[in-house]
Amino acid sequence: MSTSRFLRACRSEPVDCTPVWFMRQAGRYMKEYRHIRERHGLLHMFKTPSIAAEVTLQPVRALGVDAAIVFADILLPLEAMGIQLEFAPGEGPVIHNPLRTGADVDALRVPDPDADLGFVMETLRLVRPQLDAATALIGFAGAPFTLASYMIEGGASQSYLKTKSFMYGDPAAWELLMSKLADMVTAYLLAQAAAGAQAVQLFDSWVGCLGPADYRAYVLPHTRRIFEALAARRVLSIHFGTATGDLLPLMRQAGGDVLGIDWRTPLDVAWRRVGPEAALQGNLDPATLLAPREIIEDRARDILERVAGREGHIFNLGHGILPPTPVESVKALVEFVHNYSAR
Ligand code: CP3
């Protein structure tokens, strides 16, 4: 029997209380993080295992969460595929050679995770022995659609028009791109599991810009291939996206032991849409953590009441922690969830 309540909840097994962790739990809202960040560029932090391991552990020490997530970024593997990536101060990620043509897709290489991204595996190997058995270690990757959107748009987007034009305009190049990304992600997540990740999360953060018919035609087969490979190797997995309310049944078909739900869909509604066997993760609006304590507790209580004692719930936000979030509020939320849900 696993001693980690996070891992037990991933398998919908009974727990002593609801496990909790936060997407983007390492970051600028923590002074310990800012202290290191002042002295180093972001890419240097990701690629230096001693620094990345320290940053991975910071929120575990400060918040009392049930899981650590390795400090890395979904865009790092793209560099090894031939993409020129920069984290520009104040702008977020910028890609200097966005994909424009089928020939650009042909030129992408599929990286070897241990050779090209060994620093992530080394970070996992450094972190695992520093966690107690009750605290799980999570690995992650971006999903093919979300990665393709960065590669084609060249950075963040509101409308994903370049991505959709590419998808509709050159379906053969789109298929090749998604296949290469699915191959990369599969090998990368299996390598993370071999290096100590006990569960992996696939971030399809921006897939909610698609309607169900396009999700089914252009995304689902590729994402499903990743989850099938993980399941065949018994690697626990979480499938996450935002604005996915009407895609949830299809995302469930694509796979994952746990489905990540954003705050736009109440958990009881999500469960009715995907069926009772799925485990769910979520789903407090990250902006709630900027509110007074009573509002945070009120919204957290509402989530736990919608779960109504079902097994297979992991408490999280509906998306990542926002930079202006007060650390004390996050810490109080962890305590509230553990206490309120105690069996
Ligand atoms: O959750 C964690 O604590 C682990 C680390 C983690 C990072 N990025 C570190 C990071 C994880 C899980 C990610 C995932 C990620 N990266 C996603 C998917 C999750 C989501 O938010 O939807 C996406 C879309 C990215 C791409 C990315 N990286 C963006 C858009 C940005 C800039 C915006 C921002 O939040 O600053 C980054 C930079 C980045 N990645 C930071 C961190 C901690 C910011 C760090 C800094 O400037 O000091």
Image: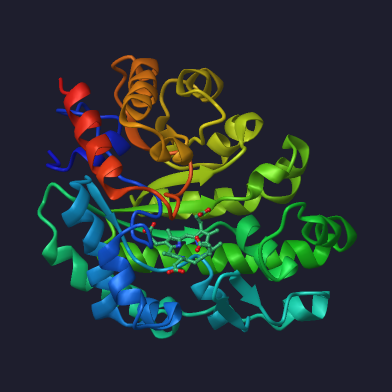
Its colouring scheme is rainbow
**In the displayed structure, does residue 226 sit left or right of residue 258?**
right
Image position, residue 110 (x, y; %):
57, 77
Q: Which residue is found at the position 18% from the left and 28% from the top?
A: 17
Is there any visible trace of residue 101 in the rendered image?
yes
Residue 190 to residue 219: above or below: below
**In the displayed structure, does residue 37 sit left or right of residue 229?**
left
Looking at the image, the residue that sits furthest to the right is 169
**In the displayed structure, does residue 78 sit left or right of residue 288?**
right
User: Residue 81 or 286: which is nearer the viewer?
Assistant: 286
Q: Which residue is found at the position 67% from the left and 68% from the top?
A: 155
Looking at the image, the residue that sits furthest to the front is 292
Is there any visible trace of residue 7 in the rendered image?
no
- Image quarter where the C terminus lies is top left
Image position, residue 163 (x, y; %):
77, 60
Image position, residue 283 (x, y; %):
44, 33
Residue 161 figure quarter: bottom right
Q: Which residue is found at the position 71% from the left and 58% from the top?
A: 157
